[in-house]
Amino acid sequence: MSRIKEAFGRGKAFIPFLTCGDPDLETTLELCKAIEDAGADLIELGIPFSDPIAEGPVIQKASLRALSGGVTTDKIFDLVDKVRKTVRLPLLFMTYANVVFSYGTERFVKTATEIGIDGLILPDVPFEEKGDFEPICKMYGIDLISFIAPTSLERISIIAQEAAGFIYCISSLGVTGMRDKINSDIDKMIGLVRKSTTVPTAIGFGVSTPEQAAKLAEKSDGVIVGSAIVKLIEQYGRDAVPYVFNYAKKMKLAITK
Amino acid sequence: MSKGRFGTYGGQYIPETLMNAVIELEQAYEHYKNDEQYNRELTSLFNNYVGRPTLLYFAARLTKDLGGAKIYLKREDLNHTGSHKINNVLGQSLLAKKMGKTRIIAETGAGQHGVATATAAALMDMECEIFMGAEDTRRQALNVYKMRLLGATVHPVSSGTATLKDAVSETMREWTNRIADTHYVLGSVMGPHPFPTIVRDLQAVISKEIKEQMLEREGRLPNAVIACVGGGSNAIGAFHHFINDKSVRLIGCEAAGRGIGTFDTAATISTGKIGIFHGMKSYFCQDEYGQIAPVYSISAGLDYPGIGPEHAYLHDIGRAEYVAITDEEAVSAFEYLSRIEGIIPAIESAHAIAYVLKLAPKLDKDKIIVINVSGRGDKDCAAVARFRGEEISDE
Ligand SMILES: Cc1ncc(COP(=O)(O)O)c(C=O)c1O
């Protein structure tokens, strides 16, 4: 069983997202430790891309901050190598197809595996295009995460049948970013997944408050939080670590009932 | 491999949220492209609203002055709204209407595609929202006004570099936000399948007409067809019906900006490498880590870091040639065509003309060249004046 799937065995999973190198790589390292200490179950590490089409303004800006700070894929590999010395949680890279493709997909996946990455999330690679990436991920033993969205409908069963690690359920139409209300029929989405696979589900896009997280965790196996954390980092910069720690603790508590 | 490939290029690299939308679009297109009623309506719009067929004009003074091959101009600048963009926009908007969509959204660079889309929305009584880089809304204030006049809402995009690529990204984001009633009218032969095919088919009317007109006038095919390439829609339109005629050279002219040896360039084939972006696998201007490069050209319509997947394929198999033209060369060609033929071309089209200034004198007088004049140059006069150190203003 993959380390990712295993992480869901410990109860409802809390999965925070960080943009690597925002505000700098040293802070990202500290944030990873703090998040683990706060009780997170997996960590999504964003490798910033210049043109992230699935992101709302908060993560777009974080990506640009990191890139203008001089962050590169190689520097992020070095960071993860350091993170792995203390952090034991499963780690996933979340980035865009071109970052992986331009590095050389096999070279990217091989290096990622060597430094202890467990999974890869590529929001611009749908089921139809996973052939460019999935066979290589399988060869090196990391999970390429599959997405389902409120528009997926009859696609859900074919996607779910081939999913590995966990299934990333997009809560709402649109891009990442905090939302007051999540209106989609999550129960129906998850119900369709459940008919096809036992792979765990995690809901992301728009989750920011403990109340939302608690509600979504009842419907699924885990909750992914990105923009709300990145916003704290935007606000507090290098001093963000205790704020993110407290927030993560609150969120984990909310989904553990 | 997935659908919509030209060799290994193309594909559908988009968020899952949009997948059913492009599948629905593909199915609708496969149906309507053979639907008699759809084709009748579109042809009627082309003939009675756009002004098709456009002229194939023999440029006698230009030919004489260059002293080589005979040069014809395909006058897409004479289309309603002033460029080839309307061919694609009317086809897609009519399709969207048949699909039951009530709202169309689009990106625009210089504003030509935005104005064309706003025009179609007015004509077909649809809601219309245009996304345009904040930089470009300042540079092309007149087109912003036109879009508003036509009833569209214009959203300035300030993310990223605030130019065309960011406008495309933002329009894709908006599409994921509201899909059920909305069609994204993509402006070039790019993006995820089926867009490169739909836009190509709609622009192919250009080469269909060139071929008929050329056979009627000269009784034979041209030796070369030359067009500017941003995403590549006017070029593919001008090439399409000649692709199997191996004797016809197909030449695409990219924007070199300040030169392909500088960072201020948008010449994708000359300076880019293969990548995956905006839904497609193709060539892109990018750094060694795959970050998309900020691009530059005096021409806002060619100021895009990628090229359509069919061009990438035609380049690889050697069926089409791609050359890079600098700002300076394009501006000189813009001025030259204006004086010698009394035709002010779009600065985009001037890139194709610039190449002909180099090529035509080297060819024999019995050779024939067709230049696709993709648009008219009114929109560019202020920028060209500024390039020459002159400020012009209506105030
Ligand atoms: C007049 C004109 N020509 C060419 C282009 C470039 O687009 P494409 O390469 O798709 O023809 C534009 C784009 O705005 C344009 O306005």
Image: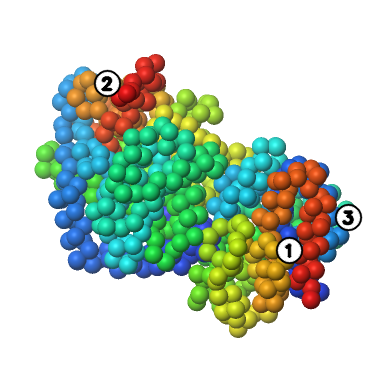
Amino acid type, label 3: Thr
Amino acid type, label 2: Tyr
Locate residue B40, reporting x and y percent: 17, 61
Residue highlighted by disc 3: A86
Amino acid type, label 1: Ile
B223 relative to B59, above or below: below
Q: Mark 1 lies on which chain?
A: A
Please, which colouring scheme is shown? rainbow
Q: How far apart are marks 2 and 1 (CA)?
A: 62 Å
Q: Which of B324 and B321 is in front in this view?
A: B324
Q: What element carries label 2?
A: helix
A180 relative to A104, above or below: below
Left or right of B240? Residue B270 is right
Circle 3 Cα neighbour tier, 10 Å, few/some/many (<14 / 14–19 / ≥20): few
A188 relative to A85, above or below: below
Q: Nearer the viewer, residue B329 or B128?
A: B128
Q: Which chain carries label 3?
A: A
Circle 2 Cα neighbour tier, 10 Å, few/some/many (<14 / 14–19 / ≥20): many
Left or right of B290? Residue B335 is left
Task: Evaluate whether label 1 is on the same chain as label 3.
Answer: yes
Residue highlighted by disc 2: B336
Circle 1 Cα neighbour tier, 10 Å, few/some/many (<14 / 14–19 / ≥20): many
Residue occupying the point 70% across, 37% down? A69
Q: Which mark is residue A15?
A: 1
Nearer to us: label 2 or label 3: 3
